[in-house]
Image (tube, helix red, strand yellow):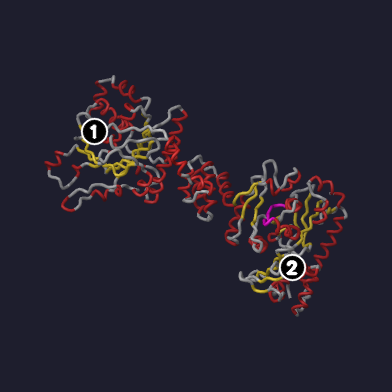
């Protein structure tokens, strides 16, 4: 017979008073403390363990006999063998284990007699005389080391941990002994700590034996893992301990910046082996390395630590350990696939928004966080009285138009609006945008930051000069040579209000940096114009287009600007319909139309009728300079007009409304 044989003997059969309950457990009056509660003692048949909710006794069948009869481990084993009619295996291995435990007990007592040698050191470490006695601490003259007996779940001294004072490493464990002590599976402090679990409903897992002793001294249920890191066996033992109590686990890494691997590994193991257990991380206050430091400093471990979810802690470690932002995003996106709790996901988004200096809505979009925190949800609830007062106190927004009279009588724009101007290729969308920009800079006195990702800055300047001096575009270079005063004319009108950035493949994050740069130079931007959406970075797939389009509104709100975004229409939608009729574009023809429709306050589409393949040559000639403008979405309209005709004058390079 070996110990495993006894551990598999059914507690339900051994304790016949326990009756099946509706939750699948077996319950009865506690046979250990004999209380009055008929259901306080619970047997969990799946793990073959017990727990008493009144006296706090817990464990397996051997623990039960030891607690019930107040006997040692060896006596309990012999008693169970008699009860089950099992012949105790008197093998050499078993005799060796018994001898080792007895010898360890003798060694522990002999080293405890040398305690005066080490007592001042222990007191300086904040360890009380009661804790010294409880844990059997002593001193080894032979090793010149503090001796810390390592007791298994049955209270047997199965090994020793030594703390040296004159050599490195400072700490050393006894060697592994099969069936008795395995360093990588052992939980130090378990016999002393588990009695406090009933009150704390929290099992703390720390790195060092003295830290566990310090925490237990303050009546916390705390154990220390032995070995390089937390292992599968540790998790299985912890699961058996906390599951009956529905307790949570708190990992307690040292505050030395070296514990991230311990926490991340533990997180992975808990997720795989015990996914239903709540796991948090204790953050030790600055100025203290570990629990023992806190005790020496007069701190209350449970109260003075702060606590956060293990998922949030791991994300913080990813950010702090990886300087490359792109790598951070990649790692965190992969990590978030394993974070199930929506509240934790929201907390992570809040943290990353601050760490990355980004709008939280953008980070939520990136992480696909759809749920606000409870506090945010409550803030969203507005009474009708408050809503009316907000309306009554609302200041009239400053709005501006495009310089095209009829259109401005229908719609006008405000800060934080998103305006999308969509068109097919070669339909004049950049030309129309330039008309608007000149009006905003010269007439409205707005400061415009123009991101030209398609046309180089010299070509943009050619369009601007042609419109300002009203000459055909192809004559601009010659005009500049013939009229050197042109430079002063352009500069006087546009120097303070128009700024152009000629770069490809930008993101909204890049644009934010430029807007902030202008703000730092006391040049607050009113309008950001982008030419155009499909030239931005990461818009090659439908999914990427959707994500980027959804960032438009957040960008406008965060930066406090009006965002005017040019966008292509799908080429496939340009095909003619039956009988050679031209397809009049709709909002659905925009690339990324779904997200653009949700994010934009105004959507304006333009097209050139002359591109209609069904027109006769005469009709095409008559309409070759015409442009149709249609408003397909508007946050606020002033009249019912939504379609307008524009005409391009090649002699002046200007667009005019056509009556």
Q: Magenta stretch containing residue 120, yes or no?
A: no
Quarter where residue 498 is shown: top left
Give the percent coordinates (x, y) of residue 60. Answer: 71, 68
Q: Secondary structure at mark 1?
A: strand
Give the percent coordinates (x, y) of residue 23. Answer: 61, 69
Mark 1 neighbour class, 10 Å CA radius: few under 14, some 14 to 19, many 20 or more: many
Q: Nearer the viewer, residue 470 or 405?
A: 405
Task: State which quarter of the image contains the N terminus.
Answer: bottom right
Q: Please give the residue where the numbered disc 1 appears in the rendered image.
A: 655
Give the percent coordinates (x, y) of residue 522. Answer: 45, 27
Mark 2 neighbour class, 10 Å CA radius: few under 14, some 14 to 19, many 20 or more: few
Write the residue at 70% across / 68% down. Answer: 41
Q: In the image, which residues are magenta?
A: 200-209
Q: Nearer the viewer, residue 352 or 636?
A: 636
Give the percent coordinates (x, y) of residue 567. Answer: 32, 43
Give the tally of numbered discs: 2
Quarter where residue 566 is shown: top left
């Amino acid at each position: 017979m070996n110990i495993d044989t006894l551990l598999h003997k059914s507690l339900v059969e051994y304790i016949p008073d326990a009756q099946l309950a509706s939750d699948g457990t077996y319950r009865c009056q506690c046979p250990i403390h004999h209380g009055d509660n008929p259901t306080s003692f619970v047997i969990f048949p799946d793990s073959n363990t017990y727990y008493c909710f009144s006296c706090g006794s817990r464990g397996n069948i051997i623990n039960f006999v030891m607690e019930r009869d107040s006997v040692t481990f060896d006596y309990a084993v012999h008693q169970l063998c008699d009860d089950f009619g099992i012949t105790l295996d008197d093998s050499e291995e078993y005799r060796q284990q018994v001898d080792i435990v007895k010898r360890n007990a003798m060694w522990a007592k002999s080293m405890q007699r040398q305690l005066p040698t080490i007592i001042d050191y222990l007191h300086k470490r904040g360890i009380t005389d009661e804790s010294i006695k409880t844990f059997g601490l002593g001193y080894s003259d032979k090793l010149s080391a503090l001796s810390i007996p390592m007791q298994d779940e049955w209270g047997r001294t199965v090994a020793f941990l030594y703390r040296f004072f004159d050599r490195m490493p400072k700490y050393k464990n006894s060697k592994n002994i099969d069936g008795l002590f395995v360093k990588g599976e052992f939980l130090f402090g378990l016999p002393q700590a588990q009695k406090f679990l009933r009150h704390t409903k929290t099992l703390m897992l720390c790195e060092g034996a003295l830290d566990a002793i310090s925490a237990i001294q303050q009546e916390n249920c705390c154990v220390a893992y032995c070995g390089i890191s937390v292992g599968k066996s540790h998790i299985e033992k912890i699961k058996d301990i906390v599951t009956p109590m529905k307790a949570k686990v708190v990992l307690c890494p040292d505050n030395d910046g070296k514990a991230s691997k311990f926490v991340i590994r533990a997180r992975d193991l808990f997720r795989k082996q015990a996914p239903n257990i709540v796991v948090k991380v204790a953050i030790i206050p600055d100025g203290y390395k570990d629990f023992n430091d806190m005790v020496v400093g007069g701190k209350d471990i449970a109260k003075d630590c702060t606590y956060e979810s293990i998922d949030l802690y791991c994300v913080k470690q990813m950010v702090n350990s990886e300087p490359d932002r792109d790598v951070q995003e990649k790692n965190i996106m992969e990590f978030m696939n394993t974070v199930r709790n929506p509240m934790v996901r929201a907390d992570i988004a809040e943290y990353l928004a601050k760490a990355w200096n980004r709008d939280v809505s953008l980070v939520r979009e990136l992480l696909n966080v759809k749920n606000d925190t409870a506090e945010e949800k409550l803030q969203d609830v507005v009474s009708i009285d408050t809503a009316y007062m907000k309306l009554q106190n609302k200041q009239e927004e400053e709005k501006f138009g495009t310089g095209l009279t009829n259109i401005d009588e229908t719609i006008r724009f405000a800060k934080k609006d998103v305006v999308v101007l969509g068109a097919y290729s070669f339909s004049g969308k950049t030309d129309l945008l330039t008309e608007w920009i000149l009006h905003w800079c010269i007439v409205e006195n707005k400061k415009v930051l123009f991101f030209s990702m398609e046309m180089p800055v010299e070509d943009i300047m050619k369009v601007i000069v042609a419109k300002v001096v009203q000459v055909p575009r192809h004559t601009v270079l010659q005009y500049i040579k013939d009229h050197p005063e042109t430079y002063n004319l352009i500069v006087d009108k546009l120097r303070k209000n128009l700024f152009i950035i000629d770069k490809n493949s930008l993101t909204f994050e890049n644009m934010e940096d430029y807007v902030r740069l202008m703000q730092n130079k006391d040049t607050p931007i009113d309008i950001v114009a982008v030419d155009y959406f499909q030239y931005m970075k990461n818009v090659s797939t439908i999914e990427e287009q959707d994500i980027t389009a959804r960032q438009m509104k957040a960008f406008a709100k965060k930066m406090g600007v009006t965002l005017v975004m040019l966008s292509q229409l799908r080429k496939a939608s340009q095909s003619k319909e039956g009988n050679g009729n031209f397809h009049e574009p709709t909002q659905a023809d925009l690339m990324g139309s779904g997200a653009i429709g949700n994010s934009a306050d105004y959507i304006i589409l333009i097209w050139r009728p002359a591109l209609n393949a069904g027109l006769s040559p005469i009709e095409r000639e008559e309409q070759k300079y015409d442009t149709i403008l249609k408003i397909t979405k508007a946050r606020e309209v002033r009249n019912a007009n939504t379609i307008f005709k524009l005409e391009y004058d090649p002699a002046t390079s200007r667009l005019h409304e056509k009556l």
